[in-house]
Amino acid sequence: MQSGERTGPEGDGDHYFTAQPASPADLRPLRVRLLDRDLDLVTAPGVFSPARLDTGTQVLLRESPPPPEHGHLLDVGCGWGPISLTLAMLSPQATVWGVDVNERSVGLLERNAARAGASNVRAGRPDDVPDDVRFAAIWSNPPIRVGKTALHELLLRWLPRLDAGASAYLVVQRNLGSDSLHRWLDEQLGPRGYTTSRHASAKGFRVLQVTAPLS
């Protein structure tokens, strides 16, 4: 892990990728607009971007194509839930898994899914997802600041669980290594038949598309 990283503009000293944040779990109201719908949600210190919908996630939500209507969808690093909630609203017949190592994030997603009426969201820690579940799509604003080793382990845990021909969309800030991550994905997954491409670029971010082989 890198030292000195905080949750964002209003970081409280916790790493957002800490399992159990030390800061008080004071719930705070957060009004956010997702898919032209105004939602009254809650957030708390000790999670990623606790005060607002961050720019990277905005880019991901705007640039990614609609997810499949059915199957299992995955949000890796769910935070307080904007990606999971968007997936759930776009695909109400699908099961959306929002996973995070941060226990506070998992609790916030549970609360916010209830507030949004998103009954198809399943919030949990990574080990809570059954091993036999495969995903029709993965959307993620991955925790780049967790460090390369941990980030690579995370991606190699989830990307191989894509359904045949399914895609993951990962938003990464350009100056935090999006191009080097692209090369690493090609090196690691290319020999296994996966393709990685730059799906979109906006506001200093790139959206990388990783597509599983058809068989």
Image (tube, grey):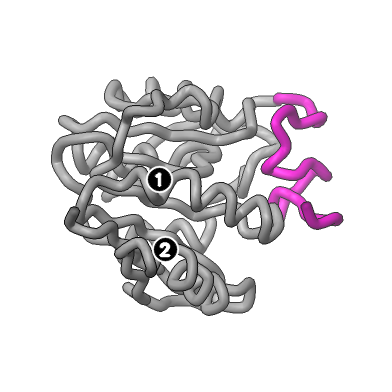
Q: Considering only vertical position in the picture, is 197 above or below 50?
A: below
Q: Which residue is at the front of the view, 64 or 112? A: 64
The mark tally for this picture is: 2
Q: Which residue is mark 2?
A: 189
Q: Is residue 13 magenta?
A: yes
> Residue placed at 21% from the left, 50% from the top?
164
68 on left or right of 150: left
Of the two numbered discs 1 and 2 in the rendering, the one whose residue sits closer to the viewer: 2
Q: Main secondary structure of the magenta part?
A: loop
Q: Secondary structure at mark 1?
A: helix
Disc 1/disc 2 C-alpha distance (Å): 25 Å
72 on left or right of 29: left
* Residue type beneath disc 2: Leu
Contact (CB < 8 A) between labels 1 and 2? Answer: no
Q: Which residue is at the front of the view, 19 or 134? A: 134
Q: Is residue 68 magenta?
A: no
Residue 195 location, quadrant? bottom left
Q: Residue 21 location in percent, x, y?
A: 75, 31
Q: Which residue is at the front of the view, 131 or 57? A: 131
Residue 167 location, quadrant? bottom left
Q: Residue 180 location in percent, x, y?
A: 57, 76
> Residue placed at 21% from the left, 43% from the top?
90
- Numbered badge on residue 83: 1
> Residue placed at 38% from the left, 49% from the top?
160
Pointer 1 or 2: first along the chain: 1
Q: Secondary structure at mark 2?
A: helix
Q: Residue 55 location in percent, x, y?
A: 51, 63
Magenta range: 1-25
> Residue placed at 60% from the left, 53% from the top?
143
Q: Residue 89 location in percent, x, y?
A: 25, 38
* Residue type beneath disc 1: Ile
